[in-house]
Image (cartoon, rainbow, N blue to C red):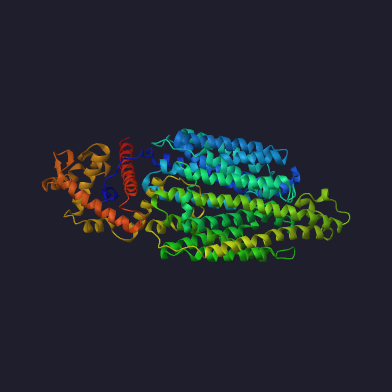
Amino acid sequence: MTTLAEAGPATGPPTGPSSLSRRQTNVVFVTIVLGMLLAALDQTIVSTALPTIVADLGGAGHMAWVVTAYLLAETVSTVLVGKFGDLFGRKIVFQVSAIVFVGGSVLAGAANGMGMLILARAIQGVGGGGLMVTAMALIADVIPLRERGKYQGALGAVFGVTTVVGPTLGGLFTDHATWRWCFYVNVPVAVVMVVMAARNIPAVKAATRPTIDYLGIVLVALGASGLVLALEWGGNEYAWGSATIIGLFVGSVVALTAFVFVELRAKEPMLPMHLFRSRVFTICSVLSFIVGFAMLGALTYLPTYLQYVDGVSATMSGVRTLPMVVGLLGTSMLSGIVVSRTGRYRIFPIVGTGVMAIGLYLMSTMGPSTGVWLESLYMLVLGLGIGLAMQVLTIAVQNTVPYHELGSATSGVTFFRTLGSAFGTAIFGTLYSNQLGPNLEKAFARSPGVSPAAVQSPAALHALPADRITHIVDAYADTVNYVFQWVVPVALVGFVVAWFLKEVPLRDSARAGASDMGDAFAAPNSADADRQLERSIARVMRRAKAEEPVSLRILADSGSHLTPGQAWALGQIHWRGKLQGGARLSTVAKAHRMPGEVLEPAFSRIAQAGYADFDGEQLAITDSGRAQIDLLAGAWRRWLDERLDDWDVSDPADRARLDRAIDGIARRLLDEEEAHLERTAL
C-alpha cells in the first residue's frame, strides 16, 4: 500500500520538528495553550470592568483606549514577532513575549491613572500578539504531523472561546476581588508558562533568515494609530475641525499612502498589494473588518449598558452577554459543517451581515423597560449574524489565492479583522463619549438632589432610590442606543458588499478545513506559504482517507504493474534512501514494529522483479524501481492537482513548493517513526 511519501521528489528537506514523547507533547501543548489563553483573554476581559475602572481612575472619555491600545499593539506585534520567531527561534520569542506581557500586566494592575493604564495595555498588546502568533507556529514545530490537525484546531478553539467569554471572567474578578486582578491574574500563570517553556519546548530555528519589512510595519502602525486617535478625540477632547484632529487625519493618510508605496517595492512585504487585485480577497478583507468592528465594539459596550441601565453586577453583565456568544459559536460551527458538505459559502456572509444589522437595530431599541429575555433574544440575533459571516471569510480567501500566497492572504484577512476590532472599539467609544456628556447634563438637571459624584459607578447609581435615578438611567440607555443606531449602517454596508463576493468551487483542502472551529476565529497563524500548503495537503489527505482508499486508487491510475505490497516496500526504500541516506531491513522492521523475517519476503520479491537490490539487510532502489516510483509520483501529482485547483503544474515555483511540502511531510513522518523507535528501545 502506498503512502503520501510516494508522492514524488522534493527539492530539499526542511528542518523537521523535534521528536517528543506523548507526555512531552502534551506538556508542550499545555504550555502553548496557556500563552494563547492569556493573550486572547485580555482582548475582552476588561469590558465588564470598564465602568468600575472609570469610577476609580476617571477619564471616561478615554475608556475605549483601554481596549483599543491593546488591539493596535497586538496587530503590529503579530506581524513583527512572526518574523522574529523565524530569525531567533520561536522558543525564545515565546518566552520574551510572555515576559513583556507580564510586565504590561503588572503595570496595568498598579495603574493610578487612565494614561498609565493605556500605556500598560499597549505593552500587554505587544506581548499578547507575540504569544498568539508564536503559539500557532510552535504547534507546527513540535507537534507530530499525524496529530497536528487536532492540536491546531483545539488551539484555535481556545482562542475563539476565550475571546468571547472574557467579559464574564472580568466581571468575576471585578465583583469578588478588584478590577486590578483582571491583570494581576496573568502574572502567576505567565510565570508558570515561562518555566514550562524553558524546560519543555525544544529550540527550533528556521533554515533561512527572513527579510523583515520594518518600514511597512512602522507606517501602518502610525497610520492606524493616528486614525484611531483622531476618531477617539474628535468631538471629545478636540473639535472635529481643530488643527489637532485635521492634522491626525492628514498624517494618517500620508502614512498609509506611504505604506502602500513601500509595500509595492518591499522584497517581502507585510501585506502584498497585489492581493487586492483579487476581488475575493478585497471583499473578504472588508467584511472581516466589519465583523471585527461589530463583534468587539458590541462586547466592549454591552456590559456598560447592562450595569448602568439594568443595574446588574459586573459578573452578571458578563453572563448576560452569553446569548451573543452562544449564537456566534453555534452559527460558526453550523456554517462550517454546511460549507464542508456542500462546498457553497457565498450565502453565509450575505445572510450573516443582514442578520447582524437586524441585531444591532434591535439592540438600539433596548431601554429600562426591556425585559431580560427580550434583551437576550436581541443579543442572540447579533451573535447569530456575526457567526454566520465570520466563519467563511478565511476559507473563501484560501480557496482563491495561489498556493504560494496562502500565508500572506490568511494573515491579511486576520489583520483586517483585528484592525476592525480596534476601529470598532474606538468609534463605539467616540459615539458613547460624545453623547453621554450632554445626556447626563440634562438628566442631572431633571434629578434634583443627585450629584455626579454620587453616581460615578453603576453600584453607587443603583444604590439610590429608583425614582431618583430614572432620568440618569435613561441617559445611559439613550447613549448606548445611540451608539448601536450609528453602527447599523456599517453592518448594512457589509450586507451590500457581501453580494459582490464571488463563489468559487471549493478546493478539497478548503472544504476539509471549513468545519474546523479554530479557523472560524482566524487566530493569528504563520504567514509562511510552505507551512500553509503543508497544512492544506494534510487536510486533503484526511478528508480523502475518510471517503475512499486513496492509495489503491493512485496505484491503479499510475499505470504501474506493482502490487500494493510491492508499492509499499518500494516506497520505503525510495524515501529512506532519499531522506536518511540509505534503507535497511532492520530499520524498516523496527519502524513498523514487525519482525524482519515477516517483511523479508516482500523485499525479496521486489528484488527478484528487478526493482531493488537486497543483500538480506541493505536495500537500494534500481533504475527499474525508480521508473515505477516516477509513475506513482505522477499519479499522486495528478490526484493532488484535481483537489488543489489553483496549483499550476506548469509553474516551476508552484511545483517546487509542492515538492518541498511533500518532502517535509515525508521527513517528519520518518523522523517521528525513528523517535518512536528510540522511546520504545528505552
Given the current orientation, which residue lies at the most extreme left position? 608
Q: Is residue 173 left or right of residue 416?
A: right
Q: Is residue 459 left or right of residue 570?
A: right
- The x, y position of residue 230, in whole percent, is 67, 48
- The x, y position of residue 348, in whole percent, is 51, 64
- The x, y position of residue 15, in whole percent, is 36, 38
Viewer-side residue, 275 vs 309:
275
- The x, y position of residue 677, in whole percent, is 30, 39
Viewer-side residue, 57 vs 372:
57
Q: Is residue 140 left or right of residue 627?
A: right
Q: Residue 463, can we see it? A: yes
Residue 309 vs 116, above or below: the answer is below
Residue visible at 37% across and 46% down? 145
Q: Residue 53, can we see it? A: no
Which quadrant holds residue 119? top right
Quadrant where the image shows the C terminus: top left
Residue visible at 62% across and 60% down? 490
Label count reads: 0
Which quadrant holds residue 508? bottom left
Which quadrant holds residue 579? top left
